[in-house]
Image (cartoon, coloured by chain):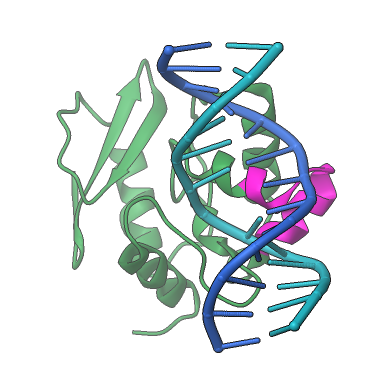
Chain colours: A green, B blue, C cyan
Amino acid sequence: MIFTPLGPISVLVEDGKVVRIELGRNVRTGDVPQGILRQIEEYLAGLRKELDFEAQIVGTCFQKRVWEEVRKIPYGEVRTYGEIAKKLGTSPRAVGRALAENPLPLYIPCHRVVAKNKLGGFSAGLEWKEYLLRIERGGA
DNA sequence: TTGTTTTGTCTAT
DNA sequence: ATAGACAAAACAA
């Protein structure tokens, strides 16, 4: 369990692999390896740019393709739903739909995906999206 | 600026 | 099979 200005973050781990990350909700979790928590804390403090731990990702074939693509977005940069869609040969709407199901926010940096002229959405609430983007922008 | 149409995928019926 | 939901975008007016 990690604390942020916006609320707690819980990490669910199954045999050494991160299965789910919950923003703003306090979920019952088992033991979480110290190294994983530290990475996330450092990331939130703006001291770390990549999360690198083992994760087990469950989803449909299409969802995994979207999540994989989103993982390639560099720290501090953003892409639009349309840009991701074009790369995968699908529609922006479908990309948003897949991101809405993202089980691993932060690890799969879906906050780096925005709408063309707006911020787009975020399952945990837009405050989280803004918060995360602010961290990566180096802002306070 | 607003509303309307088009759009791919997923879930439930 | 089909209908409805959706974290979007393009277009008409």
**Which residue is drawn at the image coordinates 46% and 71% (left, top)?**
A133
Residue A120 appears in the figure: yes
Q: Nearer the viewer, residue A28 or A102?
A: A102
Residue A95 drawn above or below residue A81: above
Q: Main secondary structure of the magenta part?
A: helix
Q: Position of residue B4 (x, y in %)?
A: 65, 63
Which residue is pictured at 76% across the width and 60% down the height? A83
Is residue A94 positioned above or below A19 on the image?
A: below
Residues in magenta, as a range: A80-95
Write the residue at 71% across / 45% down: A69
- Quadrant assignment, res A32: top left
Looking at the image, residue A73 sits to the left or right of residue A123; the answer is right
* Viewer can see residue A33: no
Q: Is residue A42 left or right of residue C5?
A: left
**What quarter of the picture does the N terminus of chain A occupy?**
top left
Position of A92 compared to A129: left or right? right
Residue A29 position within the rendered picture, expressed as x and y whole percent measured from the top left: 19, 28
The image position of residue A16, as x and y in percent, is 38, 21
